[in-house]
Amino acid sequence: MVTSKIQQLDKIAINVKSHRLVKRLLRENPRLEEIMKSSKNETEALVGVRNWVLLRLKQKPDAYNYYIRNGKKVSLQHLSWEDYAAIRILDYIDFAGHEFPDLNLHGEIAVSNPIKMIWLAVTEGTGGAKPYFFEDMLELFRQYRGEQTPKQPGRRQIEEWMERYPSGLDERIVKLREENRERIIGVIIKLIDTEKIKSVRFSFGENWSYQKKYNKVLSWWSDHRFHLKFAVRSPELLNEMLGNSLDPDTMKILYDARDAGIPFFVNPYYLSLLHVRVPYFAIGADLAIRDYIIYSRQLVNEFGRISAWEKEDLVKPGEPNAAGWLLPSSHHIHRRYPEVAILIPDTAGRTCGGLCTSCQRMFDFQRGHLNFDLEKLRPKRNWHEQLVHLMEYFENDSQLRDILITGGDALMSADQSLKNILDAVFDMAMRKREANKKRREGEKYAEIVRVRLGTRLPIYLPQRITPELIRILAAFKSKALKVGIRQFVIQTHVESPMEITPEAKSSIEQLLSAGWIVTNQLVFTAAASRRGHSCKLRQVLNEVGVLPYYTFTVKGYMENNHNFAVNARSLQEQNEEKVLGEIPKTYYDEIREFPKHTPQMVEQIADLQERGGLPFLATDRNVLNLPGVGKSLSFRVIGITRYGRRILRFEHDPTRRHSPIINKMGKVIIIESKSISEYLAQLESMGEDIREYEGIYGYSIGETEPRMPIYEYPTYPFSVTTEMTNLDVD
């Protein structure tokens, strides 16, 4: 059946643009033209190209050894740009005819055979390959000839790109947000007056003047409960709060989203960050925020049939997850690694301050496990008993030493609920430590040394960071230090420098004052991937005391096509832009000490930047969360579909421990949801000059960056057992 369909596709005529690209490809590569036209069939074409490229590659021992992976460790730094191309061409030939399930197309089989596609186009004008495919081939052979090379931008160029994006602390931006707030307050006054939203806490007295109402709502603006109560839950209200600025096409998508069952939830504060009156000095600066609120056509079309990206999140009671871990609950604990597990509480922490369009939990929203019914998410009577049971899992596991409390969003839990969870973590850590006293050296269990809270609220709803919350966090740290917990982390998610507002800055200052470090995970969306955007974000984060932690490629399938930036761009950003903030190893020990003085985090970062001559500290790693197990950016492009979408083969991150199941899983195959040509066209639609991205096609091999020492676990004064409990990989 698959073979028959592929044969049918092979008979499809290529279009006019593809013909012209093929003609140019042959004109630029006489040897390739000779091979294609002299080959009687696709096999001869494959053999001819392979012999041509292999002969050249064998003349370069490092490149050849990297290609064949003969066990000799060869650094990417020893490969030339032409070597990258030669290795990719040979990988294309080695994997020619291989079939890969394409989950972007719900499991439809994709077959990679680019040399065959070229041969069919040359000899018969068929193969069905799209212009995107031939554009990638054109760039590949230019790279092979040494005519397409990466151009390392200088510091001045990178800083010019960074200047395109003001931060939310810019006085001009602050003024615009005040205008937005005034407009939104007017809408909220009308909602209260017409009783479309009723609230005992947030209501007006009789015969109040408009000014009195306005002043009252303005005073409520600093209360996070107000923003949750008046969060946007419909396309109509979203458009009204944005000054009816959304065009008909966008509104049609939003109406369709509602009909498809996608929830709407955007709080007024965050909505005030979007431009309605676009300033000349910040054109497009809010796109990374806007694309996190406004749903895409692809998401709407896919909702209801989204496949789970994180396979280890699919848990059947009594059976191990995809990573081999046995879990006490099918939806309270997620686990990939030996050392860390995620806790999702049965509290309001199972939801967020808003729904991000590329949310990693969209699959759970689709199947109803997550929602924005805040009343129903209040803790149930049996939650305390469940929490005790979940803590026993951490206590009795031989390797767990790190608990990441998230959801949803950890800080959506009420203060008392969060305190109860942290108290349970403390009691568990204390019991685990006491139990170790009875175990012999080499048999001791890992003790809890790190507690993390995953939250976007310092950015999405900074009003949630209250004095009472800070007291809870500070008190927990004070007593947790006594039972061996040494790392306290607020793991947040800032997407744009425009999100760092005076309110967000204040919330971060308070969290640092409680003795918790604040780290950031950026999702590298198409809008966030523009030249200089991520560097400017790192710089602004540093200015308020936040350390970048990860820069994630957008995961998911076709539902996230709009926000997806190709992995080649992540590599390009890592190698051409982020390198500007590369920290000399002589400072590593100093950075490791930063968490001991969190109230002085801003000063510590600024001092190191000044001494190192760095515009920002690049403490983050560019990675992709693999759909199997772990994070990595170690890959080779081994194939390409006739639509120009690349096929990547990932290896697991060699710098950290994994579940032993990876020895059975082997390599992980990812088919990207868009071609590089489509990605560049999307950037161009954002106003980008795609000539600035020259060289992007050449990034076809990646290696995961080493982890910064500040993110390493502290060592124990004893040897931890090598036994792994709660594991079933048979």
Image (spheres, rainbow, N blue to C red):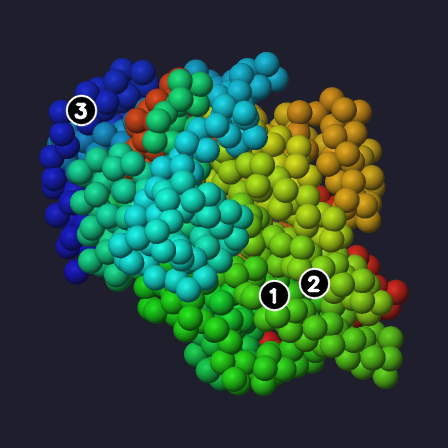
Towards the viewer: 333 or 458: 458
Hey, which quadrant is residue 362 in on the image?
bottom left
Q: Nearer the viewer, mark 1 or mark 3?
A: 1
Q: Earlier in the sequence, mark 1 or mark 3?
A: 3
Which residue in the protein does label 2 denote? 472
The residue lying at 51 percent from left, 30 percent from top is 174
Say if residue 117 shows up in the picture.
no
Q: Amino acid type of disc 1?
A: Asp
Q: Nearer the viewer, residue 446 or 259?
A: 259
* Image coordinates for residue 37, horizontal then vertical, percent: 22, 25
Q: Nearer the viewer, mark 2 or mark 3?
A: 2
Q: Position of residue 298 (x, y in %)?
A: 26, 47
On the image, the x and y values in percent for residue 649 come to 45, 48
Secondary structure, mark 3, is helix
- Type of the residue with mark 2: Ile
Task: Answer whether residue 197 is visible to the viewer in this image.
Answer: yes
Residue contact between numbered discs 2 and 3, judged by CB atoms under 8 Å? no
Labels 1 and 2: the sequence-earlier one: 1
Residue 666 drawn above or below residue 117: below
Q: Amino acid at mark 3?
A: Lys
Q: Is residue 354 left or right of residue 382?
A: left
Which disc is residue 124 wearing?
none
Q: Position of residue 513 (x, y in %)?
A: 74, 48
Which residue matches tag 1? 415
Determine crowd level at label 1: few under 14, some 14-19, many 20+ residues with C-alpha closer than 10 A. Answer: some
Question: What element does badge 1 sit on?
Answer: helix
Q: Give me the residue at 41% from left, 73% from top.
A: 376
The residue carrying mark 3 is 17
- Label 3 crowd (10 A; few <14 / some 14-19 / many >=20): few
Identify the residue shown where x is 16% and y is 53%: 5
